[in-house]
Image (cartoon, grey):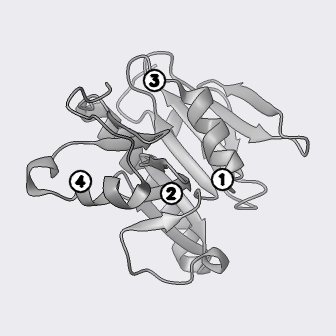
């Protein structure tokens, strides 16, 4: 939902200042083309799924000292007037110069979006990939599937759908990491 009270285009800096105000503390805000967009209040299952995927990633990443896993409150500057907050994400250690500050300058290497409502995930995936990301996993709760987005060398967006019987791969970002799609939906009995 685009916020109606807004009369101007925001920069990343002015957006972050606005998002950090006490009255906005519980709102899930993103910046798209300089316009503040309030994401719908997620269902509890969205949080469970994001934490589940983030936990699986963390269990692989931390013992190998490969980088960092972030949750849904981490801001990524994906353009001059774009800020995204994926449900979970991975950043390689080599890309992190500092853990100080409010936002990461660039997209995560792997972004995980738990899809809510009529969200345009293809547009978000392109944004992440153009800003330096490598993989985007879009988790569709109702369909019980994950769409993996990558980008060709020529910039074309590729999408591959994985169902409950499939297994996701972290390649090329996390070689050796696999996650059965069924494990993303731990409370769903088939």
On the rendered structure, is 169 left or right of 42?
Answer: right
Q: Are marks 3 and 2 in contact (CB under 8 Å)?
A: no
The reply to whether discs 1 and 4 touch (Cβ–Cβ < 8 Å) is no
Can residue 55 be seen here? no
Rendered residue at 57%/78% (across/down): 96
Cα distance in 3D space between marks 1 and 4: 23 Å
The number of callouts visible is: 4
Of mark 4 and mark 3, the one earlier in the sequence is 4
**Residue 119 badge:** 3
Q: Is residue 74 visible?
A: yes
In primary-sequence order, the first of circles 1 and 4 is 4
Rounded to the nearest angstrom, the CA distance separating label 3 from label 1 is 19 Å
Residue at image point 45% right, 51% down: 88
Mark toward the viewer: 2 or 4: 4
Mark 1: which secondary structure? loop
In the rendered image, which residue does mark 1 sit on?
Answer: 131
Residues under numbered marks 1 and 2 in contact, where contact means CB atoms less than 8 Å apart? yes
Q: Secondary structure at mark 4?
A: helix
Tag of residue 77: 2
The quarter of the image holding the N terminus is top left
């Amino acid at each position: 939902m685009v916020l109606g009270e807004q009369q101007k285009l925001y920069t990343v800096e002015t957006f972050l200042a606005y998002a950090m105000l006490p009255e906005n503390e519980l709102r899930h805000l993103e910046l798209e083309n300089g316009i503040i967009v309030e994401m719908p209040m997620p269902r509890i299952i969205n949080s469970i799924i994001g934490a589940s995927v983030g936990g699986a990633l963390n269990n692989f990443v931390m013992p190998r000292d490969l980088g960092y896993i972030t949750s849904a409150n981490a801001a990524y500057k994906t353009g001059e007037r774009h800020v995204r907050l994926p449900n979970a994400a991975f950043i390689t250690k080599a890309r992190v110069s500092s853990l100080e500050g409010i936002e990461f300058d660039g997209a995560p290497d792997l972004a995980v979006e738990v899809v809510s409502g009529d969200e345009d995930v293809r547009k978000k995936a392109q944004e992440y990939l153009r800003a330096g990301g490598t993989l985007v996993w879009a988790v569709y709760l109702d369909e019980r599937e994950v769409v993996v987005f990558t980008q060709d060398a020529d910039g074309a967006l590729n999408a591959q759908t994985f169902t409950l019987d499939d297994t996701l791969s972290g390649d090329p970002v996390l070689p050796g990491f696999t996650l059965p799609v069924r494990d993303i939906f731990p409370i769903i009995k088939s």
